[in-house]
Amino acid sequence: MAERLDLSPAEAYVAAKRRASYPQLTEFAAQMAFEFDDFQRRGCEALEDGHGVLVCAPTGAGKTVVGEFAVHLALAEGRRCFYTTPIKALSNQKYADLTARYGEGSVGLLTGDTAINSTAPVVVMTTEVLRNMLYAGSSAINELSYVVMDEIHYLADRFRGAVWEEVILHLPEHVRVAGLSATVSNAEEFGEWLVEVRGDTAVVVDEHRPVPLWQHMMVGKQMFDLFAADGEGRARINPTLVKRTEEARAALGPAGLRGQRGQRNHRGRGKGPPPRGGRGPKFRPPSRMDVIQRLDTEGLLPAIVFIFSRAGCDAAVEQCARADARLNGPEEVEQVRAIVDARTADLPERDLGVLGYWEWRDALERGIAAHHAGLLPAFKETVEELFVRGLVKVVFATETLALGINMPARTVVLERLVKYNGEAHVDLTPGEYTQLTGRAGRRGIDVEGYAVVLWQPGVDPKHVAGLASTRTYPLHSSFRPGYNMAVNLVGQVGVEQARELLEQSFAQFQADRSVVGLSRKIDRNNEALTGYAEAAGEDFAQLREYVELRRKISDREKTLARKRKYARQDEVADSLERLRKGDVISIPNGKRAGLAVVIDPGTDPAREPRPVVVTEDRWSGPLSVADFPSPVSSLGRVRLPKHVDVRSPRVRRDVASSLRNTGIAPPGKKRGKTDAHSDPELSRLRDELRAHPAHGLADRESRVRWVERYERLEQENNKLERKVAARTHSLARSFDKIRALLTERGYLADSESGDGSGDGRITRVTEHGYRLARIYSESDLLTAECIRRDVWRGLGPAELAAVVSTLVYEARRDSAGEPKVPSGGVAEAWEHTTRVWSELAEDERRHKLERTREPDAGFAWPVYRWARGESLEKVMTASESAGQELSAGDFVRWCRQVVDLLEQLRDVLGNSDEIGNAAGDAVRAIRRGVVAAGAT
């Protein structure tokens, strides 16, 4: 690191003294080609001082420097460091970075399907691998000095977040944790929890972006600043942009604003009249080529264009290729070809056609690519390398690209501000917007970064400004105990310590924090209750009795009123059923009040009667029970023709005239009778009220009002106390429910303590429980149950792979058709597996536990065919024809997840077991071709 020349002598002295205090940091910084920011230096100093550290900084700010310094310290001390990441792609990337710096002999890699130099002093791994090592009691933990947890904010992830907390809670005390997080608004709270469970931990927060981010909106082919300075230099929404969006909206008219799929309503009121007839031109956003050309003209490439759809990303690349977009020069094309050839050398040549290799390669040579979870891993990693090298200028990506992958761009474009979350189309949150746009601006390359939102009907600049300006995105724990966690905890530390450990989780820490606020409110309410009781005066208990009597009388009166209402409705319905054509009746209330003649009785056994009538003022329509407070009786009759067409004004006039000529007068209003005086219960309560000592008090009503206030507040307090009870020890209670279910099913067992103390029973892990402890899957208990019951015994390798796939596969929302399974052994085992799941789900319902996900057979046929040795083309074609279309990336990803669970079965049961042996054979059958490419 170069010596700064802009320091005064005093500042230079302080800097030199600081460097001398931190020799390891000085040595590490000297290897870097840039000056450290203050937050980077503070984070590194905390580590060298022997503290743990939590670093929260924006995307691209360079927080990984602190993690890499932990690696440097471990090597300098002759100890080990584990560098954990949330996803394999980030692990691979970090492994490549560290290997380039420290050499292959010093760095290893452990992911679900890759193991390289696992005994190295520095090992990069996914967080789940470290969690599994901790539960397995790996000896490698004893040599560990540092653990870097990159993207530690992942602990908020709904499905995988619990793993981060498990690691933090289970790591030995001597291990220092360096947590690297995106900017969150409750970093201090998270840091306080780390101090509580890990000891001394420094919290370093930096919200400053090293590369300033400029916000823009593109309306048609025009680009506008989102913000503009007012006369006093304060930022406000650009009035020119607002005017332009209003003009664009008005030009479209009502017809052009309708039917905009995937856009929720964020529009204001458009100004100006709509086009004549209300039919404006349909809105067409600028084409992808228009956007790219505008960005290229402005010098804003490379760019990431976020499209929240895999199909949309692929379609965007195709559109650009059809438009003959070429963003690379001849030399760059040659570099692309060389990298592509090297990256895809392991792919079987016979599979290239079905993988869409040639189209993908052509797009890369043009400088354009898609990036999403459906891509083949080799394709995705190639795109990442080419983009970082500047050989891909535009990437159309889903939001998964924002999760940790080091792919900064000069510009980020958002086509929409709405995405599908698996259940519904929802607005982007400020946190998601910040994470996506955080990719804009490459440190050391760009002076500024740019975020561009494409305008379309429904997008209001005010809404975009709100997303860009909001800085509130708190970190919420998703931790909850599961079956595997429960048996591991009981086996390692016993029930009581397991409950204590769960009480230390960030989830319980946050729940307890929320309880503090509720408890304070309860205390304030209790003080108010004391004041209300004093204001009510003496004999407070008697006044409460009096108020309770009043409440009972009111409740009884309401009950009787409801009974009268229902009885009246029955009586009215019966009377309406007795009406006949020509009967004259009286409508007592409403704007149709007066005489009417029945044209059609409207009786129907399936519903209440709705007679059609004509009134004196010629109105015709149906009546219902609601129109009559009491039963209806016929006041006389009018002769009517056989067919009366009430749609004819002339007919209605003639009927109304005949009705008036009858001379029948409407009856007077009847006062409804009540049976309150005849109800003995109500009479008794009223007598008690009159005889009560409080009834004769002179200031009774004012004192009663204080009692009523007291009781309303007391009810509110009771609700708050129930909330506190539900949140306090909530995780320990969930653990107890899980423990009860596992005990019922034979995974845990209670026995005498055996120490002669008479302290009762202890819970131990059974043989089946130890198997469950080694199964890490979303469907861990279901897998263990299928093993225990021999559900899969007798299956061949391909058959076992097909059935096991049902426990890991989860269909995407756009999958079509009912999944089918191969006949014979697979069908029988699948049916048995679903029966086991159904029984387990019922037990979970009984114990009030979250239900295990239902098995999904959507991947059974593809993996069955692949495990039998069929070609990729046959497998993909057969899958598509069966309505289970898969992308190549999805196919490889699901195959690898099936392999992961099969390997667990093999390791748990051993090769000597029939199922374990079949699992090992299935792994070898699946791990070939594209599935094996890139996995060692």
Image: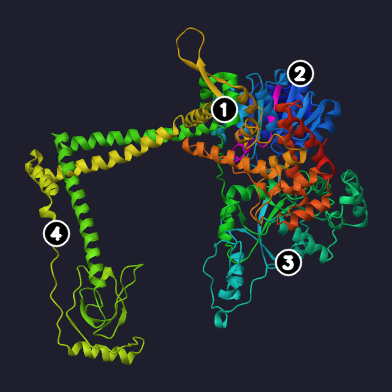
| Residue hosting label 2 | 77
| Residue hosting label 1 | 486
Q: Earlier in the sequence, mark 3 or mark 1?
A: 3
Q: CA distance from mark 3 to mark 4?
A: 74 Å
Q: CA distance from mark 4 to mark 2?
A: 92 Å
Three-letter residue code for mark 1: Ala
Whether residues under marks 4 and 2 lie with C-beta atoms below 8 angstroms apart, the answer is: no
Residue sitting nearer the eye, 7 or 571: 571
Position of 567 with respect to 514 (left or right) is left
Magenta run includes residue 151:
yes
Q: Earlier in the sequence, mark 1 or mark 2?
A: 2
Three-letter residue code for mark 4: Thr
Q: CA distance from mark 1 to mark 2?
A: 36 Å
| Residue hosting label 4 | 674
At horizontal 77% and vertical 41% (from top left) the residue drawn is 798
Q: Quadrant of residue 405?
A: top right
| Part of the protein shown in magenta | 145-162
Magenta run includes residue 392:
no
Q: Position of residue 555 (x, y in %)?
A: 21, 49
Q: CA distance from mark 3 to mark 2?
A: 57 Å
Is residue 357 visible in this depiction of the protein?
yes
Q: Earlier in the sequence, mark 4 or mark 2?
A: 2
Q: Secondary structure at mark 3?
A: loop
Choose mark 3 or mark 1, whichever is in front: 1
At horizontal 62% and vertical 48% (from top left) the residue drawn is 432
Three-letter residue code for mark 3: Ser
Q: Position of residue 302 (x, y in %)?
A: 78, 53
Q: Quadrant of residue 333?
A: bottom right
Three-letter residue code for mark 2: Glu
Is the residue 611 above or below the residue 642 in the image? above
